[in-house]
């Protein structure tokens, strides 16, 4: 049976699975909607009389999606918010897990070819970015306490002392602005408390897991408070490497945070925080999934190099179908694959209530990143492709906000200015079967923006919001003498710049600096109507963009540095937010139409993965989120996401992309269902049971839709049981993740004609854990 036949059968099985799952979900949704529609609360004025009630109702969630504190249900945008309690209940340790609890989001912890589990590749509503280079920006903005995290490497943030996580879907082109074309993920840290308290936890589990965390609030004076959190995450990897005798995919990292809060008066507050992360792991969870022995690299290796390796390696000296692993979660690499990261940041947020109607806020931040990552691209004991990435970046940002209200709070407004500056170096040591080169370069990126947004309550029910942001993005790429040159050319690959083949020392790119600058205005309009205090509908129009950049991976040589232009989206959206049955039921939904132009797509140019403005697309979709407390102690959560993403135009130069291809990381369906129940045991405390099921339909992991990298629809299941003492100072949790042991691809890379292989990184298999937590 041919690979295409196998792929077609997998696709049919995946589509049948999707149909069955969606049929079941449709029946459940009809029941939910029927209950909600039958409630008289939906049709009558009903003030939230039970807002202060703690038991038997949904937790009230406050978000800052519009740069001011608002109730989630009063915020007319598509946002999922997970509080600290919700995160702990779901056993979340880093932000990548949010894609299991929020519709239409894919959050992978390993970008293709990055060789590290610390490199985020995030897509919201089918918009994002897979490349991790300094010359390419992420498509979903990640923010820590209002500070933009510029690099995908180092942005898989640990959940240390988080108050809440907000997932904002769709472009946030006005208030967040920079590179939030797909959306934003915002982490808000917990503020230090005014009494001495804290907690400590220890976790053991599968793969020799040992996690430990200690967090404490330490008041210094009545006006100066502090908190300290230190965490250790450790585990053995789950991908075995028999040729070396080790494993990849494990954890070996430390993380910590110190926060100070100073309130000398009741109108001024200063928050200062320092966070750091140290990672000393091996490469991510890659395996060889396909061998194309008709490819150039394989042919050269098998004909020229392999015969001399036979005395040492035997049949393994050849790169062919025997190079594929004989069992799951196995990597036959014999190349050292380090994954190190040193990351720290400091931020200061000052807030001054100048008058009853006007407040001033300043956010100043600096972040520093150093990383080295290795990758054995062919995952075999031979040399077809080995890479070492040396990567460092440091960024400074400053944001000023002026917030006000007028006309008895009927008019709320915000004005702001933002400045960002980043310098960095990325050196790629790339060793192929046929050549050895040093790629990379230095960057100096800067951004300047001014923004404003205002919300007018036209009536007590109708509000109109308008906003505009002007941004100037400047990208500078410097090619110096120590990068972009040839070390070895084994097969006489010809130069495209001069006659004859490339020889050691030849330049791949000319020495010098190139600049790319973008000036862009992005508007936002939103009209919201509150039919009752608990029922709201809205319509909105928004725009977003992501700046252009440069291509740093080239081979053979080029006369000039290739560059790509900004991409942009225009989004039309309509949504609703409903609470019913005295805050026991919450139903939020949205539908949207996205016009996506100048897509920055990663394709193969010669033998290098590069970014090109390859296409235009339209993405239609919808989301539905349902939360309920049917009875005291029982909680239900359902999320449903739908995407219909299609290319509408293809750049003739992007030969790997065609109109019939599928967009990467844009599954048609994403579903999450969770349930929890708390049993009271009187003086013996309580027991809480929780289970979460997540389903995702077919995912295409590269732009050319390589069959070996297509992930058919799959589901994962997690469950936990927690005992809490009566005083809630002791918690013991036994948990299992992916308990059905589903095997699924999270990222991948393939190059059939030249590099001769396809590699994939896989999600974690079934695991159990036991956590003991003590509060004090």
Image: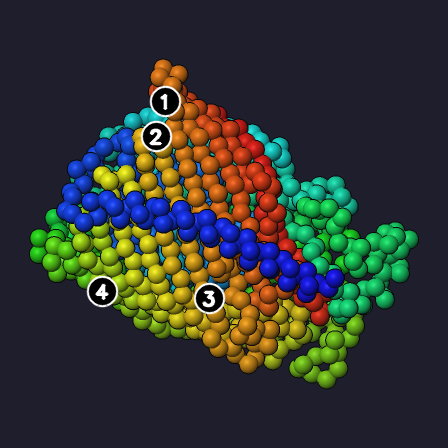
Mark 2, residue position? 633
Sequence order check, earlier mark of 4 and 1: 4
Question: SS for tag 3?
Answer: strand
**Residue plotted at (38% across, 49% down):** 29
- Which quarter of the rendering shows the N terminus? bottom right
Q: Nearer the viewer, mark 4 or mark 2?
A: 2
- Residue 198, quarter of picture: top left
Mark 3, residue position? 645
Locate residue 660, reporting x and y percent.
Answer: 55, 72
For marks 4 and 1, give the CA distance.
Answer: 49 Å
For marks 3 and 4, give the CA distance.
Answer: 28 Å
Camera sees residue 704: yes
Of 331 and 733, nearer the camera is 733
Locate residue 659, reporting x and y percent.
Answer: 53, 74
Tag 4 near tag 1, CB within 8 Å: no
Sequence order check, earlier mark of 3 and 4: 4
Q: Residues within 10 Å of mark 3 (few under 14, many from 20)?
A: many
Q: Is residue 684 left or right of residue 113?
A: left
Tag 2 near tag 3, CB within 8 Å: no
Locate residue 287, reporting x and y percent.
Answer: 68, 52
Sequence order check, earlier mark of 4 and 2: 4
Locate residue 24, reporting x and y percent.
Answer: 46, 48
Numbered circle sitting on residue 466 = 4
* Residue that protrudes farthest toward the bottom in the picture: 499
Q: Is residue 344 above or below residue 543?
A: above
Mark 1, residue position? 680
Q: Is residue 280 left or right of residue 82?
A: right
Sequence order check, earlier mark of 2 and 3: 2
Q: Nearer the viewer, mark 3 or mark 4?
A: 3
For marks 1 and 3, give the CA distance.
Answer: 47 Å
Q: Is residue 452 left or right of residue 272?
A: left
Tag 1 near tag 3, CB within 8 Å: no
């Amino acid at each position: 049976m041919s690979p295409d036949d196998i792929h077609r059968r997998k696709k049919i099985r995946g589509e049948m699975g999707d149909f069955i799952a969606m049929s079941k979900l449709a029946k459940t949704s009809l029941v939910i909607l029927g209950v909600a529609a039958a409630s008289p609360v939906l049709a009558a004025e009903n003030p939230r009389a039970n807002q202060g009630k703690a038991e038997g109702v949904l937790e009230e969630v406050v978000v800052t999606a519009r740069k001011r504190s608002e109730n989630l249900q009063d915020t007319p945008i598509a946002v999922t918010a997970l509080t600290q309690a919700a995160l702990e209940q779901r056993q979340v340790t880093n932000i990548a897990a949010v894609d299991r609890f929020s519709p239409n989001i894919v959050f992978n912890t390993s970008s293709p070819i990055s060789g590290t589990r610390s490199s985020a590749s995030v897509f919201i509503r089918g918009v994002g970015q897979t490349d991790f280079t300094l010359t390419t920006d992420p498509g979903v903005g990640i923010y820590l306490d209002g500070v933009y995290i510029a690099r995908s490497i180092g942005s898989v943030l640990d959940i240390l002392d988080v108050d809440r996580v907000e997932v904002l879907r769709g472009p946030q082109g006005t208030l967040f602005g920079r590179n939030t074309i797909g959306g934003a993920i915002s982490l808000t840290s917990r503020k230090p408390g005014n009494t001495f308290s804290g907690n400590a936890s220890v976790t053991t589990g599968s793969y020799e897991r040992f996690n430990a965390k200690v967090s404490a609030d330490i008041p210094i004076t009545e006006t100066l408070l502090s908190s300290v959190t230190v965490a250790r995450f450790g585990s053995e990897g789950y991908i075995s490497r028999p040729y070396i005798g080790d494993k990849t995919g494990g954890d070996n990292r430390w993380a910590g945070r110190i926060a100070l809060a100073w309130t000398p008066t009741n109108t001024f507050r200063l928050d200062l925080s320092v966070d750091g992360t140290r990672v000393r792991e091996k490469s991510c969870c890659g395996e060889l999934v396909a061998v194309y022995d008709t490819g150039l690299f394989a042919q050269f290796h098998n004909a020229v190099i392999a015969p001399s390796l036979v005395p040492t390696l035997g049949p393994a000296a050849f790169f062919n179908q025997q190079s594929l692993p004989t069992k799951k979660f196995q990597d036959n690499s014999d190349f050292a694959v380090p994954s190190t990261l040193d990351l720290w940041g400091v931020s200061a947020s000052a807030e001054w209530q100048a008058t009853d109607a006007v407040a001033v806020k300043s956010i100043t931040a600096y972040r520093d990143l150093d990383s080295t990552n290795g990758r054995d691209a062919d995952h075999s004991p031979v040399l077809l492709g080995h890479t070492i990435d040396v990567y460092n970046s440091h960024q400074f940002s400053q944001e000023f906000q002026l917030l006000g209200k007028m006309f008895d709070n009927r008019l709320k407004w915000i004005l702001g200015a933002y400045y960002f500056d980043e310098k960095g170096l990325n050196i790629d040591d790339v060793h192929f079967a046929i050549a050895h080169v040093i790629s990379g370069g230095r960057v100096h990126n800067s951004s300047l923006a001014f923004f404003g947004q205002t919300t007018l309550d036209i009536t007590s029910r109708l509000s109109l919001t308008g906003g505009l942001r002007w941004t100037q993005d400047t990208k500078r790429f410097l090619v110096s003498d120590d990068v972009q040159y040839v070390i070895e050319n084994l097969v006489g690959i010809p130069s495209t710049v001069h006659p004859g083949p490339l020889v050691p020392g030849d330049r791949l790119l000319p020495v010098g600096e190139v600049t790319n600058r973008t000036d862009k205005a992005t508007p936002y309009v939103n009209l919201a109507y509150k039919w009752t205090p608990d029922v709201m509908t809205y319509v909105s129009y928004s725009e977003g963009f992501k700046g252009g950049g440069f291509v740093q991976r080239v081979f053979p040589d080029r006369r000039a540095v290739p560059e790509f232009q900004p991409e942009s989206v225009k989004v039309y959206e309509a949504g609703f937010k409903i609470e019913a049955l005295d805050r026991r039921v919450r139903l939020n939904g949205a539908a949207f139409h996205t016009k996506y132009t100048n897509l920055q797509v990663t394709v193969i140019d010669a033998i290098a993965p590069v970014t090109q403005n390859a296409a235009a697309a339209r993405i239609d979709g919808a989301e539905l989120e349902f939360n309920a407390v049917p009875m005291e102690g029982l909680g239900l959560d359902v999320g449903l996401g739908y995407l219909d993403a299609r290319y509408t135009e293809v750049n003739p130069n992007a030969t790997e992309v065609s109109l019939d291809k599928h967009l990467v990381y844009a599954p048609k369906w994403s579903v999450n269902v969770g349930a929890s129940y708390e049993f009271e045991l009187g003086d013996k405390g309580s027991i809480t049971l929780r289970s979460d099921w997540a389903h995702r339909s077919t995912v295409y992991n590269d732009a050319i839709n390589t069959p070996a990298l297509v992930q058919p629809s799959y589901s994962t299941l997690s469950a936990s049981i927690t005992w809490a003492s009566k005083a809630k100072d002791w918690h013991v949790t036994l948990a299992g993740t992916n308990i059905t042991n589903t095997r699924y691809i999270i990222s991948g890379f393939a190059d059939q004609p030249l590099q001769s292989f396809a590699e994939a990184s896989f999600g974690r298999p079934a695991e159990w854990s036991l956590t003991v937590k003590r509060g004090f």
